[in-house]
Amino acid sequence: MRVNRSNSVPRPCTCTTVRRASRVLARTFDGVLEAVGLNVTQLAVLRAIQRHAGEALVRVAEDLCMDRTSLYRAVGTMRRSGWVVVREGPNARARSASVTAKGRRVLEAADPHWADAQAEVVDRFGRREWAALARQLERLAACAAAVGAARNGGGDGEQGDV
């Protein structure tokens, strides 16, 4: 039997609050990146593929905290645009990708638009405040992962120094 803790549960909802902020940020960055024909998710995926060149796409998904299906969908679109090339492995989990010359040009074109928006958002928010919030969001994500692991039988829920 579950105990009704509705009066003692902290509000607002952590997930809803972070998702709301995420949607506003995504709209902002999507708007500035539209000029070069990509969105902020594609930018993040392209950058992650560059960081993990030659590694399995499952590693890229882990880096971005994305499920493989969403990543493969994004990679498929970028492959059709000629921004990435996908190499098959011995199984689906071993597929890898690399950024093409066309993809590198798109990244180079996107960078000043992203940098301007990033600087403006952070400057309005405060550079120290952003650095502190980024650390706290990493901690919040680790806490949520620990709860998920504990509730889903994925281990003891320990995530290091949470």
Image (cartoon, grey):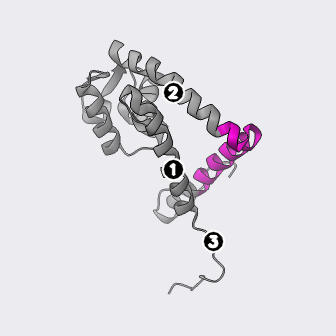
Label 2 Cα neighbours within 10 Å, binned few <14 / some 14-19 / many ≥20: some
**Residue at 31% across / 30% down in the picture?**
94
**Magenta-colored segment: predominant secondary structure:** helix
Boundaries of the magenta span: 122-143
**Residue 86 is drawn in which quadrant?**
top left
The earlier-in-sequence mark between 2 and 3 is 3
The earlier-in-sequence mark between 2 and 1 is 1
In the picture of the structure, the residue carrying the numbered disc 3 is 11
Q: Is residue 13 left or right of residue 96?
A: right
Q: Is residue 51 left or right of residue 141?
A: left
Asked whether disc 2 touches disc 3, contact meaning CB atoms under 8 Å apart, the reply is: no
Residue 152 against residue 58 in the figure, above or below: below
The amino acid type found where label 3 is placed reads Arg
In the picture of the structure, the residue carrying the numbered disc 1 is 24
The amino acid type found where label 1 is placed reads Val
In the picture of the structure, the residue carrying the numbered disc 2 is 113
